[in-house]
Image (tube, grey):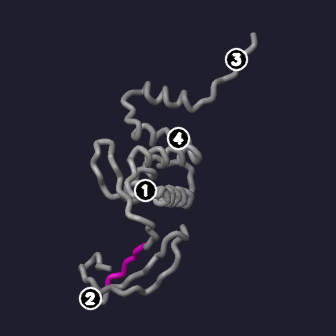
Amino acid sequence: MRCPFCGNIDTQVKDSRPAEDHVSIRRRRFCPACGGRFTTYERVQLRDLVVIKSSGKREDFDRDKLERSIRISMQKRPIDPERIDQMISGIVRRLESMGETDIPSKKIGEIVMEALARIDTVAYVRFASVYKNFQAADDFEDFVHELRPPSPPTEE
């Protein structure tokens, strides 16, 4: 592992332990060249995934990009960070176990929305506003209206 401070390639692992999410390994490292200390995380990757954008462009799947977009939608929501990490790991495992290496971005968006809908409706609407490219307040209104069950007719 390359030292982030001096670029030395020969760094040493001083401590390894499971991370809080229990799906990755946290490693404390030391660089003998500059004395720098840093932490790395190691995760299991079942297969290399490629995202097929709606434009047809192909790009490598980026877990960090997925995590950033989910965390943005959940900003200032009363959700335990560990629960968010578990949700992200679950989404990635689901994508990896689909059996396909090429996954349409639309499918990823649907899976994320499905997971968010189970955890927090505000985060779900926030994510949907970007994913579905809302352009006006009416788009929000229509989307939220679809979320609400129809109210029973009132008797007069």
Real-space Cα distance between discs 1 and 2?
43 Å
Q: Main secondary structure of the magenta part?
A: strand
In contact (CB < 8 Å): disc 2 and disc 3: no
- Numbered disc total: 4
Camera-near label (3 vs 4) is 3
Real-space Cα distance between discs 2 and 3?
75 Å
Q: Earlier in the sequence, mark 3 or mark 4?
A: 4
Q: Earlier in the sequence, mark 1 or mark 2?
A: 2
Real-space Cα distance between discs 3 and 4?
27 Å
Q: Which residue is mark 1?
A: 100
Magenta region: 35-41
Kind of residue at disc 3: Pro
When asked about the image quadrant of residue 1, the answer is: bottom left
Q: Which residue is mark 2?
A: 33
Number of residues whose C-alpha sits closer than 10 Å to that of mark 2, classed few (under 14), some (14–19) or many (20 or more):
some
Q: Secondary structure at mark 2?
A: loop
Q: Position of residue 17 (x, y in %)?
A: 51, 79
Q: Which residue is mark 4?
A: 122
Q: Which residue is mark 3?
A: 153
Camera-near label (2 vs 3) is 3
Q: Earlier in the sequence, mark 1 or mark 4?
A: 1
Q: Quadrant of the C terminus?
A: top right
